[in-house]
Image (tube, rainbow, N blue to C red):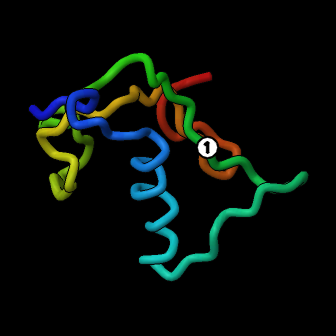
Amino acid sequence: VKGAREERVDVAVLLTAAVSRAYRVLGLAAPVWQVGCSANFVVFDEANDWAVTPQVIRGAHRNTPFLHHELPAVVHTTLVDGMVVFGNL
């Protein structure tokens, strides 16, 4: 497993690659941040790292460029359209 801190992976760069570019690649409109919109966000702890291994990936797919890499944050909760889809609040 390659270390996130040793490789100097910046959390902002990682999030941009994993989230913002995904909208463009999929031809979707970027999220809008304004009063009244549904919340889509992730609560994470950048003080802790985690390794992406086949054992921690949920579902049958294992197709990710981050496999066998250590990432510089641990996701605690994910909300989509204002509903918790991973973790808890």
Residue nearest the observer in this picture, 45 or 87: 45
Q: Position of residue 77 (x, y in %)?
A: 52, 30
In the image, residue 8 sits, relative to residue 65, either above or below, namely above
User: Would you say 36 lies left or right of 78 here?
Assistant: right
Quadrant in the picture for residue 25: bottom left
Left-right relation of 37 to 53: right
Q: Quadrant of residue 75?
A: top left
Q: Is residue 25 above or below residue 47?
A: below
Q: Position of residue 72 (x, y in %)?
A: 35, 30
Picture quarter containing residue 67? top left
Q: Quadrant of the N terminus?
A: top left
Mark 1 falls on what kind of element? Answer: strand
Q: Residue at x 53, y 38 (%)?
A: 78
> In the visual, does 55 lie left or right of 12?
left
Residue under the image location 56 percent in, 31 percent down: 43
Q: Residue tagged by mark 1?
A: 41
* Residue 48 coordinates in the image, percent (x, y): 37, 18
Residue drawn at the location 64% of the way across and 49% of the way down:
40
Image quadrant occupied by the C terminus = top right
